[in-house]
Amino acid sequence: MDQEIYLVSVAVEHSTTGFETGASRRLFHFHGAVGVWCYDVALDCNRFLVTAPLEEDLVSPVTLITDWTRKIDNR
């Protein structure tokens, strides 16, 4: 099941009494299933590197082999 996942930015104000958060702002949308995507922030904090699977990797066929022990015995 795919979910809508966004990386967001939130402004934070720090003071001696605590901190306050501003409104969140969507930076970009992760397309795909949860747990599939990885990212990293560049050292200059101005860019992201995001992994993205190849289109052919998004749908993988499943091959089910039944009675496989019989096929080994026939060798």
Image (cartoon, rainbow, N blue to C red):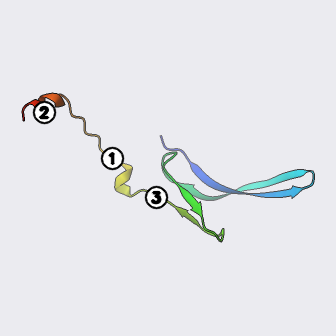
What residue did someone put label 3 on?
A: 52
Give me the C-alpha separation between circle 3 and circle 2: 39 Å
For the C terminus, the quadrant is: top left
Q: Is 16 on the left-hand or right-hand side of 44?
A: right
What residue did someone put label 1 on?
A: 60
In front: 73, or 62? 73
Q: First in sequence: mark 2 or mark 1?
A: 1
Q: Residue 27, position in %: x, y?
A: 63, 60
Q: Residue 55, position in %: x, y?
A: 37, 56
- Amino acid on which the number 3 mark rests in the picture: Ala
- Amino acid on which the number 1 mark rests in the picture: Ser
45 shown above or below 51: below
Give me the C-alpha separation between circle 1 and circle 3: 15 Å
Q: First in sequence: mark 1 or mark 3?
A: 3
63 shown above or below 24: above
Residue farthest left in this picture: 74
Element carrying mark 2? helix
